[in-house]
Amino acid sequence: MAKLEQSYEALCELAAARRARLEESRRLWRFLWEVGEAEAWVREQQHLLASADTGRDLTGALRLLNKHTALRGEMSGRLGPLKLTLEQGQQLVAEGHPGASQASARAAELQAQWERLEALAEERAQRLAQAASLYQFQADANDMEAWLVDALRLVSSPELGHDEFSTQALARQHRALEEEIRSHRPTLDALREQAAALPPTLSRTPEVQGRVPTLERHYEELQARAGERARALEAALALYTMLSEAGACGLWVEEKEQWLNGLALPERLEDLEVVQQR
């Protein structure tokens, strides 16, 4: 019985030792599996972040920016579990685990890949932001150019009205257009600031560098033509006003002439005094 008891105790000790070794092995392989999963995800995202695609227009750039923002959110969500995994590796090393060297190497590799991922994410965020700024500038410049073309068409119209009332209506419309022209001056200034805020590689390109000066020349031309049309409308209004007043005066003269020509001398003295007063 004593021998059996001794053998049983030895068996229990061997079982406990094997269980401890298996548990240590499980911890190591679980750590390596988590590291492998994290590395696979990191490599996949690194491949996506290395893409040179920044969209072809403002809509495409904003769509990619939204996707990148979602990726940064996912990275923030994965950072906590990744730190826990790295802490497990550090614990294995601190405990002197048989696989400590392997755990240390894999943890360092994962840490380096994660740092590389963060650097790529920051670089892509900058590229997308710059592309969005460029496309926003181009869209705003296109809107400004389209408005200038339409406004130039309006101020270049030869129509000055055909009478006092129609000319007054055209003058009111022109005053509203002049106010709109003045209100677009800040928009043109903002375009200049947008172009200056672009990185040198983009702001020095011909399509950006020469765009604002061209718009400013068109704006100055618009102001000059608006002034010319305002003066022309003022002259036409003065002419039609004079003609209207002259016509009214002529009607009054004709009316009085008819009344005087049709005036008959009364036969009674009291009637004569009334007519004389009139």
Image (cartoon, grey):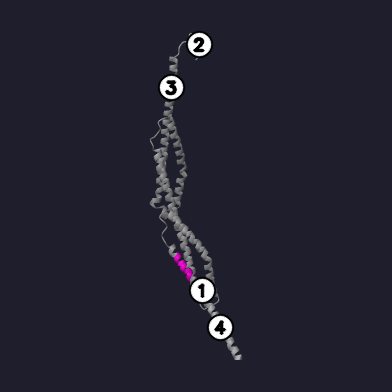
Measure the C-alpha gap from mark 3 to mark 2: 28 Å
Quarter of the image with the N terminus is bottom right
According to the image, label 1 marks what residue? 30
Q: Which residues are magenta?
A: 36-45
Say if 252 sits above or below 123 in the image.
Answer: above
Q: Which circle's residue, 4 or 1, is located before the other in the chain? A: 4
Q: Main secondary structure of the magenta part?
A: helix
From the viewer's perspective, is residue 2 above or below residue 175?
below
x, y percent for residue 212: 41, 47
Q: Which circle's residue, 4 or 3, is located before the other in the chain?
A: 4
Q: Please tell me which residue lies in front, 193 or 269.
A: 269
Callout 4 environment at 10 Å: few (<14), some (14 to 19), or many (20+)?
A: few
Give the image location of residue 173, x and y in percent.
44, 36
For label 4, the SS is helix
Residue at 44% x, 19% y: name it: 255
Residue 6 left/right relative to 268: right
Name the mark on residue 271: 2
Mark 2 or mark 4, whichever is nearer to me: 2
Residue tagged 3 = 251
Q: Residue at x 58, y 84 (%)?
A: 12
Mark 2 residue type: Asp
